[in-house]
Image: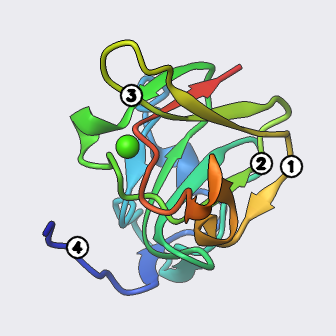
Amino acid sequence: MRFKRYTTALLTAVAGAAMLTTPATAEAVTGPTPQTSGVVVVADLSECTPGWLCVWEYPNRQGDRYSRKSAGTMELGGVGWRDRISSVWNRRNASVTLVDSRSGVVPDVTLPVPAGQLIPDLGDVKYLSNLADWNNKVDKIILK
Ligand SMILES: [Ca+2]
């Protein structure tokens, strides 16, 4: 069983400027954003900046958050997020597709998430049958 780190929902950063302090080439942001000088404002990890896709390790936008803005494919295994996502908020202006990668000749299973959609709990979203759900299944996300 994988160890899940629980972080506080608080981080110290200038609200609204947190993403702006991230270099343009760094699309992924996990956990606390580096503190900017001078002002300390509480930002909430359960929030998601408009224009970004945000995912959380627990339902209802709790726990660690991972975010991305630009189009492309996020291979979650490389960043420690495979089979870990429980909550999704697509605040981009384009859809994303959650993918559970299957092996061999079994096709991947996908779940489209339209622009603007919040899924508080992937455990409430059926996976293939009524016997399973999407909680902790996502291996890859395709951002259009
Ligand atoms: Ca999976």
Which residue is rendered at x = 68% and y = 71% of the image?
Answer: 124
Q: Amino acid at mark 4?
A: Lys
Q: Tell me the tag on residue 102.
A: 3
Q: Say left or right for 94 vs 31.
A: right
Residue labelled with disc 4: 4
Identify the residue position indicated by label 1 in the image.
116
SS for tag 4?
loop
Query: Mark 2 or mark 3, which is nearer the start of the sequence?
Result: 2
CA distance for labels 3 and 2: 27 Å
Secondary structure type for disc 3? loop
Disc 3, ligand 1: is the CB inside 8 Å? no
Q: Residue at x 55, y 49 (%)?
A: 19
Q: Amino acid at mark 3?
A: Arg
Q: Nearer the viewer, residue 97 or 106?
A: 106
Q: Mark 4 or mark 2: which is in front?
A: 4
Q: Are marks 3 and 2 in contact (CB under 8 Å)?
A: no
- Residue 36 position, x and y percent, is 41, 62
- The x and y percentages for residue 125 are 69, 61
**Is residue 19 positioned above or below 103 on the image?**
below
Quadrant in which ligand 1 is drawn: top left
Quarter holding the C terminus is: top right
